[in-house]
Amino acid sequence: MRAAPARVGPPVRVARGPRRAAGRRSIRGVRVECRNRILFRREVDESDDGAESITLALGDSRSEHVRGVLKLAAGDSLRVGVVNGSPATAVVSTMDATSMTLTWRPGVETDDGDTARRSLTAPLVDVDLLLAMPRPKVMTRLWAPLASIGVRNVYLTNASRVERYYWDSTALDEAKVIAELTRGMEQSGDVRMPGVCVVRRFPAAVDAVREMTGAPRRDGGQEPRGRGGREGGGNGGGMPREGSAFWLVKPPPADENDDDAEVVMLTAHPGAAATVGDAFGDLSSSSSSSSSGRPRRTRAVVAVGPEGGWTDFERRSLLDAGFVEVALGRRTFATDVACVALVAAVRERTSSW
């Protein structure tokens, strides 16, 4: 049996700093912003010739991104856009130590030297999300991915397994929600901000989704479609005003082909026999022309329940409203993963990326 090696020299002592007081530990971190398109809202100036411009002060985070990350100078170009407006390619017209001015023409975007006129056009398949209010931390980190993946509207509702204190969190602070949605849009390069509607009563939320999408009612009739406004808070068009229903962020402008859109409603449920592909079936009808002569659009509504799942009553309510239960394989996902996975499955099945 081998003996342990002899210790050489005095015992080693590890110097430690003063012990922290018990409580929350302070962690310093650096947040990296991925801005593939810089977005603006109502602060844009418009000239007589139709060009738009904005002057950014030195302390503006967008100005710091242009200077420090993109490292652009006067005369260089970058991708910009107006929220719920048009994407464009801007030129840094002036830059000094205190400010910079960006100028562009709405809808004109230059890529690789080729200039193409573009406008804010909705995809052939729009996706709305009916979501039982998750834990505040989950909701906070969900805003940016939902905007990046192109969700049109988010309807937050209550459920039997949703804790009451979730609704009192800062995850529903209007300024923070808009900031996170903008961050996700800048990441993906989109200009359309998702609408966010808070409908505390679950039956009212199901009715609100049918109203906004024009989905068939149980009696076979068609719900009148609600019309929404532009980005910003407050109550908006088309939603019930009674109870606790209001638009936290108003929906994007309605598309002219919404009235001819086909509606497919899905709800995620482990063990369901159908898949997303089964629910959509043959998409030949979606690719046909509408009454206006344009390609027929599809609106998909996906419902994701709380961490504990929908109750039997809530499941029956969704099925009675026309939702189809679908499964995402054998795995059970957390709320944030289920939301992104379900929307991604719809986009992949319908080729609407």
Image: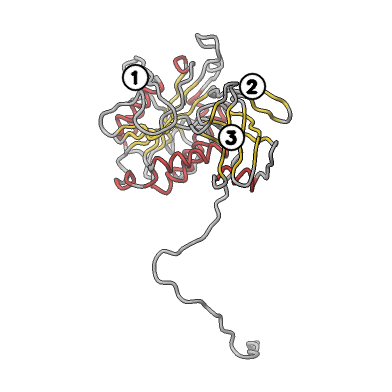
Question: Residue at image x 38%, y 34%?
Answer: 233
- The spot of residue 284 in percent (x, y) is 56, 16
Q: Secondary structure at mark 1?
A: loop
In depth, the one of 273 and 128 nearer the eye is 128
| 3 or 1: tag closer to the N-terminus | 3
Pointer 3 with pointer 2, Cβ within 8 A? no
Quadrant of residue 101 within the rendered picture = top right
The disc labelled 1 sits on which kind of residue? Answer: Arg
Residue, disc 3 = 189
- The spot of residue 343 in percent (x, y) is 50, 33
Residue, disc 1 = 217
In depth, the one of 165 and 275 nearer the eye is 165
- The spot of residue 314 in percent (x, y) is 32, 34
In the rendered view, would you say 332 is above or below 205?
below
Viewed as shown, does residue 18 lie left or right of 209? right
The disc labelled 3 sits on which kind of residue? Answer: Gly
In the rendered view, would you say 89 is above or below 12?
above
Count neighbours of disc 3 (C-alpha within 10 A) and say few if under 14, some if 14 to 19, many if 20 or more: many
Rendered image: mark on residue 117: 2
Quadrant of residue 20 within the rendered picture = bottom left
| 3 or 2: tag closer to the N-terminus | 2
